[in-house]
Amino acid sequence: METLILYTVWIITAILLVIFINRKTLIRAQVSFLFMQVPSWLFGALVVQGRLIEYPVGFLSIAYRASFTFEFFVFPAISSIFNVHFPKEKPWFVKTIYVFSFPTVITIIEVFLEKYTELIKYLNWTWYLSFITVTITLLISYCYYLWFFEKIKKIYGP
């Protein structure tokens, strides 16, 4: 069942990328995707090495004990969508709802997977730590996104 869930997650994530990333936003999404793989890999490795979380079932689990699916595909894809569609021209409360909606959905799904599957097991971890780390990581990614494209704009123009 876990392997079926993993395949389904890959397919759903790919579909979300096709729906939310278009030709106009492709370069911005690619930069976000590639950037997010670094902190995602780092934090994933730290929580596994620190025996905070365990991933009993997953792709490449012999070589990589953290979640390859989440850290190298799903979370970078979510970050791409988050950054490209960030409501920067909207009021602060809309931005706040936007910022917290992504980690809320991710955390709810993670808690469900932790409770009902062998894909993730909390050892010394809780749902609110996931919520906090996902929120912070998405905000770091967005700051990098803004910084990177501001630099590009200064060099090459609008």
Image (cartoon, helix red, strand yellow):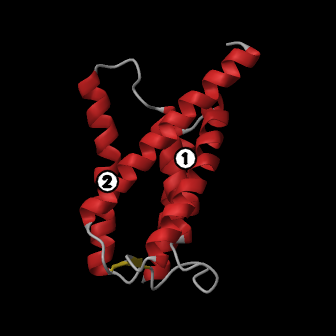
Residue at 36% over, 48% down: 135
Amino acid type of the residue tagged 2 in the rendering: Ile
Q: In the figure, 117 relative to 103: above or below?
A: below
Q: Secondary structure at mark 2?
A: helix
Three-letter residue code for mark 1: Leu
Q: Position of residue 111 (x, y in %)?
A: 28, 68
Is tag 1's residue or tag 2's residue first in the polypeptide sequence? 1
Q: Residue furthest right?
A: 156
Q: CA distance from mark 1 to mark 2?
A: 24 Å
- How crowded pointer 2 is (Cα within 10 Å; few <14, some 14-19, many 20+) is rated as some
- Dividing the picture into quarters, in which one does residue 23 lie? top right
Identify the image quadrant of residue 60.
Answer: bottom right
Mark 1 or 2, closer to the camera: 2
Left or right: 106 with respect to 20? Answer: left
Residue of label 2: 132
Q: Position of residue 118 (x, y in %)?
A: 38, 84
Q: Which mark is residue 65?
A: none
Q: Which residue position holds label 1? A: 17
Residue in the image at 32% along x and 63% along y:
109
| Cβ atoms at labels 1 and 2 below 8 Å apart | no
Compared to 131, does 44 lie above or below?
below
Q: Please give the name of the residue rendered at 54% of the width and 28% of the height, measured from the top-left corner.
A: 146
